[in-house]
Each structure stands twice: as structure tokens, then as C-alpha cells.
Amino acid sequence: MKTVMTSLAILLLSYSAVAAVPAIEMNQKAELDADTLVLLVSPEQLAQSSSAVLQHKAIQHAIKTAEFKAKKAAQLDVLAEVAGYNRVVLLGTGEPKDLTAATSNNLGADIAAWIKKNKANSFTVDATAVQAGLSNADFAAQLAHGIELRSYSFDRYFTKNKAEKAKKLEILVTDEKAAQRQFSKLQAVTQGVFLARDLVNEPAAALTPETFAAEAKKLEKIGVKVRILDVPAMEKLGMGAILAVGKGSQRPPRLVVAHWQGSEQKPLAIVGKGITFDTGGYNIKTDSDSILRMTSDMAGAAAALGTIKALALQKAPVNVVAVMAMAENMVSDKAMLPGDILKSAAGLTIQVTNTDAEGRLVLADALWYANKEFQPRAMVDIATLTGAKVGAVGTYYAGLFSEQQSLVDQLTLAGEKVDEPVWRLPLGSQFADEIESDIADMKNTGSSTGASTAAWFLKQFTGETPWAHLDIAGNALSRKDNEVNTKGASGFGVRLLTEWALQQP
């Protein structure tokens, strides 16, 4: 059997630290010289002793002694010579009917976590006996996707070499070609997620509006059309909102446009908030933990760019444009002041009642630009926007705001499939009074309903285009290694938005 090799021994990402991602092979029979077998087993298979490995006396003894039931993610490690391996790890899948793409990803993450702790260099994972709602090929591909995602690391600033040697992993499947075909698409998504994670993990001194734009330009090598608007270009368009946010910094703002045109349909638009560092401006942040996390305030823009990379790498037959509003919100003699009146590109005037509500200001001009320039058939913005969203649904969900039920349904289903769940929060004209100003068309903050008020503010710049707002405050960072995430940037939104784009009619 010819071995199909992937290109995962070292992932060369456009803005990456060295990540010890396993080199993964999909095979129909064992070909690696591995000393460890990871056998995926369901309760039913366990009860039937459905394989020679499960029938082995040493395995039977270990199962009985440990009272192993093959529950979801349960592990049993057996040091014994079985079927040519020196070690066998039984990994419970739980009930096969409960296996989805998302739960298969998480099983893969469990395998990656175990492999990372193990000193061996090569492993065989037997997934051939798994009978799930997915085909065996889909299951194996999603399993490998989870392994990749959990194997991410960000090591570029360690003075000692922390990177581990890339390990070899063979996944046994019933249909090698189908599994490889599915996996190659998911590898593209992995690289999009890793790009977003790398960008968010970078400290603010290294990632500025200009360096973010430079990273976007690198995607031209894979067929993405990239346009960068500098300060004079934004001045010409009257983008007074983004310019006001960025004028307090010596590192000027940029509007970054990345367009993957894989079809001739009207485009979908993704608009990302890209505050590369947020001091809060003159309404300065005073909590040390909060301000330390503000290197992640460009996670929306990172997710938008990662989505474009994921689509371009798999040559997806979709037309998607990402517009990313990049700025630093700093304190200086040039910075915007509380009470200032700004004029947006849409022509609406905005009273700045809080300089720490800057994300909605840069998004206002970016939404207007995406709508005017590309006339998209639907538009989604993604932003780490409000602490109020975290207070409402924590980090368990992203906040979803939209008046278009079809768009709510599409994003909800996409989120469920990739385990990046969203929860719909209120949006409606009852919030209009919150942003009414005495001296301008509107003000940038309300008095009570922070997340919904922010969404209503954004809606004023979307025209008649079907639009949804994703508030990912709290979702952009993971406080610990968990499921497919490692501690630090999660890349939340890349898988959700890629799935959404791919599922559009």
C-alpha cells in the first residue's frame, strides 16, 4: 500500500513560532515502525471484544482490573507486547451515535495531549473499527484535525529551545484516499487558525497596524488580493472614526482588505476589529490583568484574516472579502478626548462619551467601506467588543446579534458543527435611546445595556445588507489547555466563519 504523506512535519506558517505538530499519515494498513498503538474503542466494541487486541489476555486483564468502560475520553494505558506493539492505549469514544465532527476533534485533542507527554516518537492510531454518525474517512480526518489544533505552541520568545521534535503519527482508516481528501481541507483550516493564534499571541510592540498589514500581504502568494489603505487614503474617504482612534499613537492606523475570490457570486464580507493595543485612551484601563490582555484586542481581525487564509489554501469555491480596521488606542497629546465629535465615513457624527469604546468606532468605518466597496450579499463583523457580553454568556458562547433570522440560523449551525458556539442576544430599536446624543447624531456608549447597545450602534453603518455581529470578548483567549485549544490565543472564529462561508448556497 502506497503511503500518502502529508506536509505536517513542520508547518511553515506565515507568522509562526515553531510548532511541534505531528507528521500525520492516513493508511489502510500499519506501515510506521511504531511501538505504541492507540486503539479507539466504543462500549459496544469493548463488550464484544471485537478485535484481536481486545481479546489479548493482557488487555483483558487490564480492562477488568481498571474497570474500563470505554466512556468518552477515558484512557487505559497497558504496557505489554500486543500485536507487535510494546504499548497499547485504549481510548474510549463513548457511544458512536454521539460522535460528531466536534467531538471527534476533541478526541483528537486528547490524543495530542497524551502524545505530548509521551517520550516515544511514533504512534499508530487505529480508527478503523469506529462506527459513527460520520463516515470513517470523515471521522479520521476530524480526529487528525483535533490532533493538529491541540499540538500548537508559541515558542518564538524563549531563549532556550522549547520546541519538541515533531513526532510521527499514523492513523489507520478504511478508505485512505477519502480520509486524505477530507484531511487536506481541514489542514487549510488549521493553518488559518494557527495564523490567527500567532497574531493574537504576539506582543503589541511586535504587532502593529503596519506589521499586521505586512502579514496580510503575504497571503498574495496563495492567490489572495490584498489592499492596504494608509492614513491619506482613509482621509480621502472621510474615515474620521478610525483615524480618531489611531491618531494618539505614533504607529498609524491601517485599513486592511484581503479578498479571496473563488467564485463569481456576490461576495460575503467579514469585518474584523483590529485594535493592536488598547490602553482605553483617556478613559484608561486601570485593572492590570485587563490591560495585559489588550494585546488580544485585534482577535477579530486575526480571525478574519485566518478565515481568508483557510479558504484560499483549500481553493474554496466561494467569494469572501475581509476588511480589517487596525489601530492602536493610545494616550498622547494627539489622542481623541472624551466629548470629541467625530465624523464617520458614512457621514454620521459621533460624540465620544468614552474613549475605551473605540472598537465600535473603527468598525463603523470598516462596515461602511465593506458595504460601499463590495456590495456584499451578507456581512458579519467579529470583535472582542464588550465586557457586558462576558457578563451575559461568559466564555461559553460568542454573542450573536442580528435581525436576520436566516443569518442567525446559518451562524448558529456553523458554530455547532465546529464547536465554536454562539448565543443570540437582543438587538432592536429599543436600544436607540441609549446612544442618542444632545449634540451629535449619536454617541458611542449607552448607559446600561453595553453589548446590545454596541451592536445597535454598529447597525447604523450596515445599510440594507443582511448583517450579524459576533462579540468574541472572552473567547479569544484560553486560560488553559482545553480540548482543541492550548493556553493563550484560541483563534476563535476562524473555523466558525470558514464553515459559514463554505455552507452558503
Image: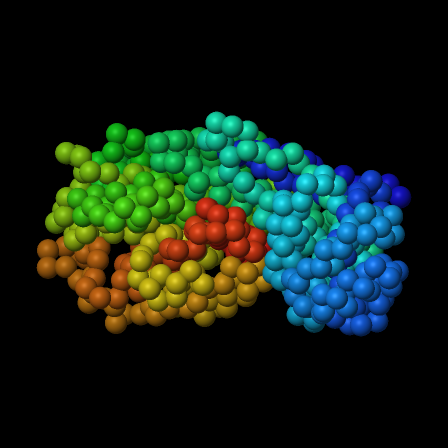
Q: Residue at x 80, y 68 (%)?
A: 45
Count the marks: 0
Horizontal side of 27 relative to 132 (left or right) equals: right
Horizontal side of 82 relative to 410 (left or right) equals: right
Q: Residue at x 79, y 44 (%)?
A: 35
The relative height of residue 374 versus residue 93 in the rendered view (above or below) is above
x and y percentages locating residue 503 in the rendered image = 59, 59
Horizontal side of 66 relative to 369 (left or right) equals: right
x and y percentages locating residue 412 in the rendered image = 50, 66
Q: Residue 381: in sight, yes or no?
A: no
x and y percentages locating residue 181 in the rendered image = 73, 49
The chosen color scheme is: rainbow
x and y percentages locating residue 320 in the rendered image = 51, 48
Quadrant that contains the N terminus: top right
Q: Residue at x 22, y 41 (%)?
A: 244
The relative height of residue 313 versus residue 126 in the rendered view (above or below) is above
Q: Nearer the viewer, residue 448 or 378?
A: 448
Quadrant that contains the C terminus: bottom right
What is the quadrant of residue 230 in the picture? top left
Residue at the top extreme of this rendering: 159
What is the quadrant of residue 294 in the picture? top left
The relative height of residue 495 versus residue 155 in the rendered view (above or below) is below
Q: Residue at x 20, y 46 (%)?
A: 284
Residue at the left extreme of this rendering: 438
Q: Residue 82: in sight, yes or no?
A: yes
